[in-house]
């Protein structure tokens, strides 16, 4: 069972209140001079300000918690507001066809929201999210996603990585690197909270395996390249709530990658520069 206390994010709400107040002042000037659409925008600004004030008062008075558990092949969660049940849901795990977890970011990689979507066999969607008044926060969001992976709920590759971590008895609280040979696959696992680790791994792959230049996927959490001259061979890098998994499938070259802390250089910038230079 997992217990999560939602973050109130008072500072963020105050910041938005100030922003809406400034917006209202600008619209008020337009209302005095021209009216028309400025009148509607002014009322919208007042509404947004009132919403922020109400949300600040609400979260100050109400402590929201989440209880998430898997029991008897059933995934269930209960949301409490001051120990009073606010919302409750349960799903039979056998009915779940697909699970996706998404951590959304605002501009500048500032955490915004978390959503776990469960698609059932009848194509019904059930969501677990932190909503608009509260936030789980990045650390708790990763904790929820990790909990789901331990019960085989999530992306197939992430579940595989989670099972590998458990199989090798890897301490996920400690930054480290580990390897595993499995048939044609050679996996390098990296446990790290450094968000630059993904970029470092990708740069190493690009530098050391230049013949793998057919990019199949290149997103914030996955990088997949193939060798155009080899039919059944690829290199995949994927980030997940636990860490990073690099898979070399049917790759004959020596597969050795480093964590950022293994590179020389005092700053992240220097370390990434060293990767490009092959140091």
Image: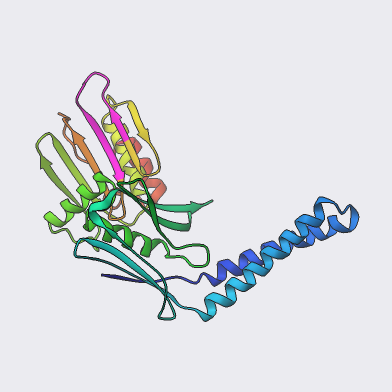
Q: Given the current orientation, which residue lies at the most extreme top position?
A: 229
Any part of residue 258 in sight: no
Q: Quadrant of the C terminus?
A: top left
Q: Quadrant of the N terminus?
A: bottom left
In depth, the one of 239 and 76 nearer the eye is 76
Q: Is residue 122 above or below residue 10?
A: above
In depth, the one of 98 and 173 nearer the eye is 98
- In x, y percent, where is residue 109? 48, 52
Q: Given the current orientation, which residue lies at the most extreme left position?
A: 183
Q: How is the image coloured?
A: rainbow
Looking at the rendering, the stretch of residues picked out in magenta corresponds to 224-238
At 58% from the left and 74% from the top, the residue drawn is 56
Residue 228 on the magenta segment: yes
At 17% from the left and 52% from the top, the residue drawn is 163
- In x, y percent, where is residue 202? 33, 39
Left or right of 88, for residue 13: right
In the rendered image, which quarter is residue 251 located in? top left
- In x, y percent, where is residue 134? 49, 67
Q: Given the current orientation, which residue lies at the most extreme right position?
A: 33
Residue 275 on the magenta segment: no
Q: Is residue 46 above or below residue 219?
A: below
In depth, the one of 127 and 219 nearer the eye is 127
Any part of residue 2 in sight: yes
At 20% from the left and 35% from the top, the residue drawn is 248
- In x, y percent, where is residue 278? 29, 36
Q: Is residue 41 above or below residue 187?
A: below
Q: How many marks?
A: 0
């Amino acid at each position: 069972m997992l217990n999560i206390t939602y973050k109130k994010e008072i500072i963020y709400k105050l910041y938005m209140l100030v922003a809406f107040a400034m917006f209202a002042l600008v619209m008020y000037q337009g209302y005095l001079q021209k009216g028309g659409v400025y009148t509607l925008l002014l009322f919208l600004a007042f509404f947004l300000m009132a919403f922020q004030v109400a949300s600040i008062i609400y979260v100050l008075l109400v402590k929201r918690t989440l209880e998430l558990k898997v029991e008897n092949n059933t995934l269930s969660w209960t949301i409490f507001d001051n120990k009073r049940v606010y919302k409750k849901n349960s799903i039979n795990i056998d009915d779940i066809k697909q699970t996706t977890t998404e951590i959304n970011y605002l501009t500048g990689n500032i955490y915004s929201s978390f959503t776990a979507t469960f698609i059932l066999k009848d194509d019904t969607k059930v969501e677990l999210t932190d909503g608009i008044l509260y936030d789980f926060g990045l650390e708790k969001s990763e904790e929820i996603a990790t909990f789901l992976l331990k019960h085989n709920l999530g992306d197939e590759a992430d579940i595989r990585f989670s099972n590998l971590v458990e199989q090798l008895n890897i301490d996920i609280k400690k930054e480290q690197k580990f390897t595993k040979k499995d048939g044609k696959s050679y996996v390098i696992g990296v446990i790290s909270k450094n968000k630059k680790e993904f970029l470092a791994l990708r740069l190493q792959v690009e530098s050391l395996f230049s013949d793998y230049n057919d990019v199949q996927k290149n997103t914030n959490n996955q990088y997949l390249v193939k060798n155009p001259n080899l039919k059944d061979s690829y290199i995949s890098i994927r980030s997940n709530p636990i860490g990073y998994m690099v898979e070399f499938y049917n790759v004959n070259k020596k597969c050795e990658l480093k964590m950022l802390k293994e590179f020389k250089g005092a700053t992240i910038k220097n370390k990434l520069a060293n990767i490009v230079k092959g140091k």
